[in-house]
Image (tube, grey):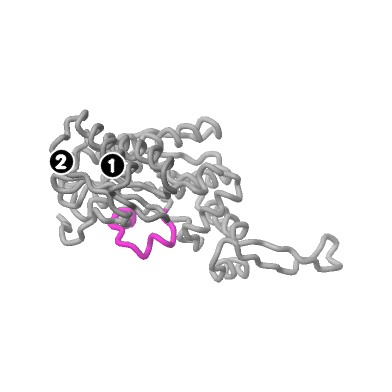
Amino acid sequence: GAYCTELLHRLPRAADVLTVRRRQPGGAAFGLVSYNANTLAHRRLEDILGKIGPIAVAVSGGVDSMTLAFVANRVNPDTQMFHALSPAVPAQATDRVRDYAERLGWQLNLIDAGEINDPAYLANPANRCYFCKTNLYDTVTFHTELTVVSGTNTDDLGDYRPGLVAAEEHDVRHPFVEAGISKEMLRGIAGYFELNDLKDLPAAPCLSSRVTTGIEIDADMLPVINDAEQALWEHLQLNIPVKGVRCRIRPDTIAIEIESPADIDDSADYAVEAQGIVRNLFNEAGYSEYTSEISIEPYERGSAFLIDTISVE
């Protein structure tokens, strides 16, 4: 009950184990029962979801919202899933949502949130996510009266997240936050339910996050960025250990950022070939003005984000 819930918040890692005494059937003796943080976390999450009642989950296709959608559907099969079809959403994320919905019988609603037609969003200010989420939640709440929930977790609370302002304005709830669940713990929940394709899924923010703040979002370019990253991922894995790759759009240039435990050598054959892959894709799509200079750099989280361009209009 409340005692185990409090203990959950004290567990710093998903691998920690709590052992408690529990009365055996018949009430005559006590036995020792072990719970790891994943078990406690998913039970706390299920308890919160059950109390909310039927909900609408905003599902992006990433590990956070997909894990939440999976657990929510277990708790209440009347759960509604809402996924936005957009050039900013990687095609593989949409495919993942469709696949889960078909296999698990989710009630899936595919929507056009309309952010790509919003001049405030396309201007790409530092608070672009506010306009994205405002359009998303406006659309979801237009289609349902159910309580809307997001996959926001406790780790997100320490970042600059203007989308959370839009969520608050639309009374969106964040069950992972309410349950004290971090990114590591929700990955543990995905592992607990043997969602092996989700538990180690790399972070995949929307494709607009690859465009440096202040550079206008070009809807036709976003799928090209995604194609480039997928091609780079397949190419680089054959040469170096890779944890992630980003194709960053800068003024008149492109930066290939590689997340790897190995040192990045921008003169190595694999790096030169990576530049060629990106150059060909962007040239073929009509964006040759960006390909005269393509750099190879170590991955830097949020490097396209420039806070001094913020707009609240």
Residue stretch in magenta: 152-168
Magenta: predominant secondary structure element? helix
Q: Nearer the viewer, residue 299 or 150?
A: 299
- x and y percentages locating residue 252 in the rendered image: 13, 44
Q: Which label was assigned to residue 155?
A: none
Regarding residue 134, the answer to whether it shows in the image is: no
Q: Amino acid at mark 2?
A: Ser
- x and y percentages locating residue 234 in the rendered image: 40, 37
- x and y percentages locating residue 274 in the rendered image: 30, 40
Would you say residue 247 sits in the magenta stretch? no
Q: Residue at x 50, y 60 (%)?
A: 181
Task: Name the residue tied to disc 1.
Answer: 272
Q: Which type of secondary structure does the marked residue at label 2 adopt? A: loop
- x and y percentages locating residue 40 in the rendered image: 61, 60
Please identify the quadrant where the C terminus is shown: bottom left
Please identify the quadrant where the N terminus is shown: bottom right
For this orientation, the residue located farthest to the front is 268
Residue 198 in the figure: left or right of residue 212: right
Contact, mark 2 vs mark 1 (Cβ under 8 Å)? no
130 up-or-down from 85: above or below: below
Q: Using a 10 Å C-alpha cutoff, classify the residue at mark 2 as few (fewer than 14 neighbours), some (14 to 19) or many (20 or more).
A: few
Looking at marks 2 and 1 on the same chain, the residue that comes earlier in the sequence is marked by: 1
Q: Residue at x 15, y 35 (%)?
A: 288
Regarding residue 243, the answer to whether it shows in the image is: yes
Q: Nearer the viewer, residue 149 or 211?
A: 211
Q: Residue at x 45, y 60 (%)?
A: 177
Q: Amino acid at mark 1?
A: Val
Label 2 to label 1, Cα distance in Å? 14 Å
Task: Name the residue tied to disc 2.
Answer: 292
234 up-or-down from 10: above or below: above
Residue 301 in the figure: left or right of residue 175: left
